[in-house]
Image (tube, helix red, strand yellow):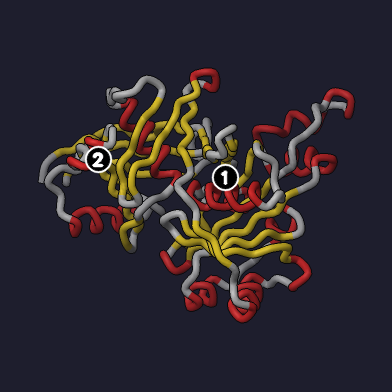
Amino acid sequence: MSQRSFKQIDVFTATPYLGNPLAVVLDGTGLSDTAMQRFAAWTNLSETTFLLPPSDAGRAGGADYQVRIFTPGGELPFAGHPTLGSCHAWLEAGGVPQQTGCIVQECKVGLVQLRRDEAQAGRLAFAAPPLQRSALSPKLLAQIAAALGLKAEQIQSAQLLDNGPVWLGLLLDNPQTVLALMPDHLMLKNLGYKVGVVGIESAQAATPLIARSNREARAFAAATPAQIPLAAPAVEVRAFAAPLGINEDPVTGSLNASLAQWLIAEGFAPEHYVATQGTCLNRAGQVHIQRDAQGQVWVGGDAVTCVDGTVAL
């Protein structure tokens, strides 16, 4: 074992301990897959990452670093909050990208671009990987609805979403339905699917919901209607990943990426919005979604370092 630089990052929040934590080993060189998996199981966080130099192919494609992403139960080809948190840790440790304003991460799904918005205190955003989506069978949809305690009329649309991780996505009738869910996690685990649910409030009704569920926006509650700007739709997301041993994930970048690609393409959501996630876990995650003029969806979020030191590995 040797001492390796280590950080624990809170992602999708600018306030420590209100987002989704990520363990980052800044130098994973020489570690076996077994050692990485063992450490990820020990941290018991939803994800632990290990930074490495790019592979030859990655370097040829412009990669600045390579990341391996592990849950307590296995390796992921891609994940959103580990992408933002790992990039934050790499930059904070002195990493310098080859291209100004653009960072290229190599992971199992391929090369992922990130950009840094200096106007937003250096907020990072990643380019959502290509999405494959397909319809669900009526039988599977009925089983998932039963596990979530949903009635058929509460489900507006459903898709199987694959951008590396596979999520079964459900668009529900409103954010209140999302917040009220009390899933049967054992049933979801036995079905073998990670499930992401989203509810979208109309712009007119968004402000009261935001004031109730988002700590960073509660100041609006004391304002008069004339003082409150026209709200974007309030978007509430929850992620249930019982097959990975995680009943509910606080804030989930890969899910929000695939939901955004689906919802914007089908006209359910605007090209720019902020999704709230983690409310039911006493978190206040904020996921900033934007589709640019070329049709690329960007998924952004703040990140803050909570632990900085070394780990014996």
Q: In the rendering, at what x and y percent does residue 143 appear?
A: 61, 78
248 lies above or below 82:
below
| Residue found at the very far front of the displayed protein | 294
| Residue found at the very far bottom of the displayed protein | 139
Mark number displayed over residue 136: none
Q: Which quadrant of the figure has residue 142?
A: bottom right
Q: In the rendering, at what x and y percent does residue 257 appear?
A: 53, 47
Mark 1 = which residue?
A: 283
Determine whether label 1 and label 2 are within 8 Å by CB: no
Task: Identify the residue at image location x=61%, y=69%.
Answer: 183
Q: Nearer the viewer, residue 74 or 269?
A: 269
Mark 2 = which residue?
A: 58
Distance of label 1 from label 2 (alpha carbons): 35 Å
Task: Identify the residue at image location x=18%, y=38%.
Answer: 4
Q: How many marks?
A: 2
Task: Identify the residue at image location x=29%, y=23%.
Answer: 96
Task: Identify the residue at image location x=35%, y=38%.
Answer: 86
Q: Decide which of tag 1 and tag 2 comes sooner along the chain.
A: 2
Q: Nearer the viewer, residue 169 or 246?
A: 169
Q: Is residue 93 left or right of residue 223?
A: left
Q: Is residue 310 visible?
A: no
Q: In the rendering, at what x and y percent does residue 250 appear?
A: 52, 50
165 lies above or below 152:
above
Under tag 1, what secondary structure? loop
Q: Indicate the amino acid at tag 2.
A: Gly
Q: Is residue 37 left or right of residue 264?
A: left
Q: Indicate the amino acid at tag 1.
A: Arg
> Which of label 1 and label 2 is nearer to you?
2
Under tag 2, what secondary structure? helix
Q: In the rendering, at what x and y percent does residue 22 appear?
A: 39, 44
